[in-house]
């Protein structure tokens, strides 16, 4: 179990009890989850944390760079604790998001960029569906 109080402090986040409780639910393993997954998990864990606090805390963690987001627009927004460069497969039938390691994808061509911009990273989202 990681030391969530230290982890939050190291990332310049005041470790309130609720933030520490939320961090303990999130950061004990690499995982993808949505805000509603986390609300369900918090309720199951008998944590009395309002939905607004959960949304605000996720927003704070994201802004401090300790959570990555994968935004599937109108479908769902996933939070990801794995901050390393990697790609995803999203199954639209099951709504499950799975990691794909960086070594499994290679780019043979990327677009030219304007002179004032430089390449930062390219992450791929592959959408799949179950065969009927
Ligand atoms: Zn991921």
Image (cartoon, rainbow, N blue to C red):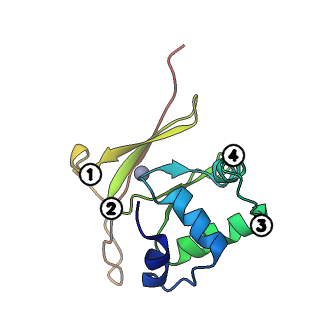
Q: What residue is rendered at 57% in x and 80% in y? A: 15
- Sequence-wise first label, 4 or 3: 4
The residue to which callout 1 is attached is 102
Q: Position of residue 91 (x, y in %)?
A: 51, 34
Local SS, label 4: helix
In screen coordinates, is 107 left or right of 48?
A: left
Cα distance, mark 4 to mark 2? 29 Å
The residue to which callout 4 is attached is 44
Single out the residue that lies furthest toward the top.
132
Foreground mark, 4 or 3, reads: 4
Q: Are marks 2 and 1 in contact (CB under 8 Å)?
A: yes
Query: Mark 1, residues whose alpha carbon is within 10 Å: few (<14), some, or many (≥20)?
Result: some
Image quarter hosting the C terminus: top right
Q: Which mark is residue 52?
A: 3
Local SS, label 1: helix
Cα distance, mark 4 to mark 3? 17 Å
Vertical arrangement, residue 54 with respect to residue 100, above or below: below
Q: Position of residue 37 (x, y in %)?
A: 64, 47
The residue to which callout 2 is attached is 84
């Amino acid at each position: 179990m990681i030391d969530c109080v230290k982890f939050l402090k190291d990332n310049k986040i005041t470790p309130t009890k609720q933030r520490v409780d939320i961090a303990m639910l999130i950061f004990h393993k690499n995982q993808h989850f949505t805000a509603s997954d986390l609300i369900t998990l918090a309720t199951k864990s008998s944590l009395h944390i309002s939905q607004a606090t959960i949304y605000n805390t996720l927003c704070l963690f994201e802004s401090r760079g300790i959570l990555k987001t994968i935004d599937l627009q109108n479908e769902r927004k996933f939070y990801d604790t794995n901050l390393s460069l990697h790609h995803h497969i999203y199954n639209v039938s099951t709504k499950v998001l799975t990691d794909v390691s960086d070594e499994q994808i290679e780019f043979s061509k990327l677009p030219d960029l304007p002179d004032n911009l430089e390449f930062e990273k390219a992450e791929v989202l592959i959408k799949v569906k179950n065969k009927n």
